[in-house]
Image (cartoon, grey):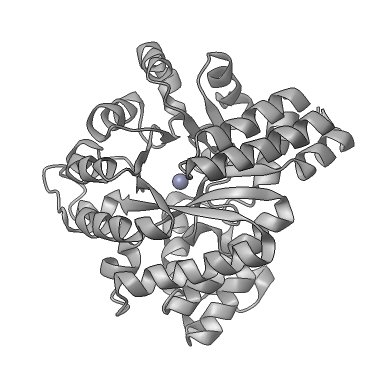
Amino acid sequence: MLTPELKQFIRAMPKAEVHIHLEGSIAPETVLELARRNNRLDNLPAHDVDGLRRWYTFTDFSHFVTVYVAIMGMLQKPEDFALVVYEHGADMARQNIRYREVTFTPYLHLGWEQKGLTIPELLDGINEGRERARTEFGVEIRWVFDVPRNANFPDPASAENYNPEPSELTLEAALAGQPCGVVGFGLGGYEVNCPPEPFAHVFGPAKGAGLLSVPHAGETEGPASVRGALDHLGADRIGHGVRAIEDPALLEELKKRAVPLEINPTSNIALRVYPDYAAHPFRRLDELGLTVTVNSDDPPLFNTSLVQEYEVLAGHFGYDRAGLARIARNAYRVAGVENDVKTRLLAEFDAWVAANM
Ligand SMILES: [Zn+2]
């Protein structure tokens, strides 16, 4: 049960998060600021925060994509990226999130829409924001650069029709970004008709360069997508992965290979992967012995936050303090951050838990 004491515990606990999208977590206030800066107010259906918040509200996948694309179009110059990353840091401080692995989709800014930006300019923008956030709020941010799977399939009716260019551009950006905090290589978007297998040609080199393989799978498609991510992309973690619950042999495989899941309960319900929290397999996956983490995915678009996701664990899935702390610790454990920083963050977390349990 979500008591006031448990709420306070969740808020105060030093948290980490490994599945959240930069472009999907820009607050309506910041979208308005960017639209004014870039003379793009005409591209928004509302010019006040409340109106934008209503427009953000999830109705169906195609509306979600419309909103996402419009928000993405607000990011035009390196300083726009710096602003949204800095705001990320401010949000982390507000929720007491000490570490975030933020997914960023460079292809959307480099190739999909021609913004005249180069990879170094993009990296400069996001890292200026990251440095300011670290200095001002003491928070650690690392990056996952992900391939937007649907951009590689211009004709979604045919999986044969694979265009490698978006994948290759993403790999180039990720490798260039390694010195400034890129630790993972991902694959996002709508899985239907966009299976993982064709993407092996970029995941091999990404892993070879020391990046974690963290594709989305088992969200809008079932167990076959997760299996493809394991066997062909060498997945070190699975984004979502909840639908692995449909295949007992696959669950055994995930356990055997110790591949953690990045679970986003509220996102799954908004996207109708499950009708409600009662039907969501978070707790079952945990009890089966998989390493599970809880995350917020695209928080303003799903009207959530990491704090609220922990409240869901307590209020809907019955987790107590010890259970919440165990799940929270998993996020640090599976993070791609350098070992010395991970050791420090874990020591801080363990000390806090020891003093507050
Ligand atoms: Zn995601």
Q: Is residue 338 above or below residue 300?
A: above
Residue 318 can be seen, yes or no: no
Q: Residue at x 30, y 62 (%)?
A: 107
Q: Position of residue 78 (x, y in %)?
A: 43, 77
Residue at left offset 57%, top offset 27%: 280
- Outermost residue to the left: 160
Quadrant of res 132: bottom right
Q: Position of residue 61 (x, y in %)?
A: 44, 50
Looking at this view, name the residue that lies furthest to the front: 340
Where is residue 354, by image quadrant? top right
Q: Quadrant of residue 235?
A: top left
Give the left or right position of residue 231, taking residue 300 as reference.
left
The quadrant the N terminus occupies is top right
Residue occupying image coordinates x 52% and y 38%: 268
| Residue depicted at x 11% and y 43% | 160
Q: Nearer the viewer, residue 150 or 128?
A: 128
